[in-house]
Image (cartoon, grey):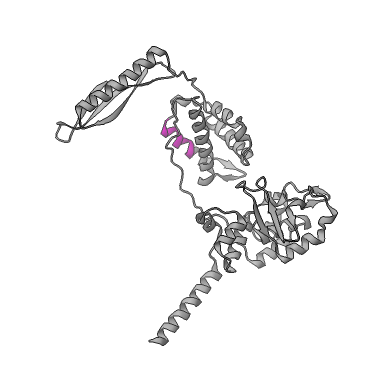
């Protein structure tokens, strides 16, 4: 403890002055933890800064303002975070709960005070080896687990449940953001032919609007404006929690008209099966994809398809983003896919330019 300078490569004390002073108490042992910081090139300034820090430390000891922390476990931090009202209101709460269960199984008993960066790295590697539904977790999925852990620890630190945040600065795996794919019109028709009618209706709506599955399944007749030809999505329905309007194609408008909103109450769901709201499409959709020769296709890929088709049709990027609710160009790029047709058109455009340039010469 005190002020000092460090040796340079010649073994001579030189450079700026550093001060070392008491910073906090270890929550387990009660030992004083010291910290070191650079105080500049003036010894007089370093002396004053050290005196100021020591005076603050003595006041803390005199007044008994030491924060006492319970040495919590990873499981206790996660349970506390998942119990917060704001956390329970998140759309991703069910997924967060599932991720937390996996984290608690793997590292739930670990004490916060003993966690180090290498422990977090080891946890990431173990998660990469974990299987779910017969497949190992991808780097992006591992990142979602670590992101949940970071958020929980950040909140615990802000609420003074823990004295330090061992997740601060934890590095994530590099992700391939170009996930998903766009399907061709022929593939789409092949998919429809293998779907039950009530699921095919939802899939057709997704193909025509780019809406998310939960948005479509939550759609009620009060959200359908037949006169204006739009779907009015409330903030409660969208991922961004912002209202947006989705234009209806003539085919979709006709479909909704044929169903007959006049035969339903405003609160009734638009997409139903045997009079009941459709709750899940995963099983019939996955089965139809396999039968149509489209294994691995996700319902969300219909959203990728809509964005790609809208771009090919020449629709302005801002308009597409308004329809889909994408906030940034980077997110838009993730959903817009370049395929063989784009490359063929590019070759034709370049050839026309080159031929025209040759003729001018």
Q: What is the span of residues highlighted in magenta in the rendered image?
A: 116-125
- The outermost residue toward the front is 227
Find residue 46 and report its horizontal and vertical position in percent: 24, 26
Side of 6 where 344 appears, left or right: right
Q: Is residue 19 magenta?
A: no
Magenta segment, principal secondary structure? helix
Residue 165 picture quarter: top left
Q: Is residue 31 left or right of residue 320?
A: left
- Vertical order, 164 against 59 (above or below): below
| Residue at 40%, 85% in the rendered image | 358
- Nearest the eye: 110 or 269: 269
Q: Nearer the viewer, residue 278 or 17?
A: 17
Identify which residue is drawn at 49% across, 29% down.
158
Q: Is residue 123 a member of the stretch shown in magenta?
A: yes
**Total numbered circles:** 0
**Residue 63 in the image, given as x and y percentages of width and height:** 41, 13
User: Which quadrant would residue 75 be assigned to in this image?
Assistant: top right
Q: Is residue 181 visible?
A: no
Which quadrant holds residue 67? top left
On the rendered image, what quadrant is the C terminus found in? bottom left
| Residue 242 visible in the shown view | yes
């Amino acid at each position: 403890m005190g002020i000092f300078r460090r040796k340079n490569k010649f073994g001579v004390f030189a450079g700026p002055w550093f001060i070392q002073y008491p910073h906090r108490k270890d929550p387990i042992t009660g030992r004083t933890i010291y910290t070191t910081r650079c105080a500049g090139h003036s010894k007089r300034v370093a002396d004053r800064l050290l005196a100021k820090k020591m005076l603050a430390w003595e006041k803390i000891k005199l007044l008994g303002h030491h924060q006492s922390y319970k040495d919590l476990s990873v499981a206790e931090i996660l349970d506390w975070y998942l119990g917060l009202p704001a956390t329970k209101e998140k759309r991703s709460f069910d997924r967060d709960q599932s991720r937390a269960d996996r984290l608690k199984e793997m590292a739930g008993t670990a004490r916060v005070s003993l966690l180090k960066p290498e422990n977090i790295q080891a946890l990431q590697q173990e998660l990469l080896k974990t299987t779910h539904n017969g497949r190992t977790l991808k780097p992006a999925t591992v990142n979602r687990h670590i992101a949940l852990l970071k958020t929980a620890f950040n909140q615990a630190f802000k609420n003074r449940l823990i004295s330090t945040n061992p997740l601060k600065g934890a590095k994530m795996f590099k992700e391939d953001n170009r996930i998903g794919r766009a399907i061709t019109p022929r593939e789409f028709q092949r998919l429809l032919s293998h779907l039950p009618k009530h699921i095919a209706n939802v899939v057709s709506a997704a193909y025509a609007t780019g809406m998310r599955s939960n948005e479509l399944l939550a759609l009620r007749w009060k959200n359908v404006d037949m006169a204006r030809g739009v779907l009015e999505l409330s903030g409660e329905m969208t991922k961004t929690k912002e209202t947006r309007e989705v234009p209806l194609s003539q085919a979709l408008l006709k479909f909704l008209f044929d169903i007959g909103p006049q035969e339903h109450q405003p609160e009734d769901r638009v997409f139903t099966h045997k009079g009941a709201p459709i709750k899940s499409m995963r099983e019939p959709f996955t089965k139809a994809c396999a039968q149509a020769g489209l294994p691995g296709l996700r319902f969300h890929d219909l959203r990728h398809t809509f964005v790609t088709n809208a771009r090919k049709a020449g629709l302005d990027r801002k308009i597409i983003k308004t329809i889909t609710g994408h906030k940034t160009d980077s997110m838009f790029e993730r959903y817009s896919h370049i395929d063989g047709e784009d490359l063929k058109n590019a070759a034709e455009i370049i050839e026309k330019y080159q031929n025209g340039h040759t003729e001018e010469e």
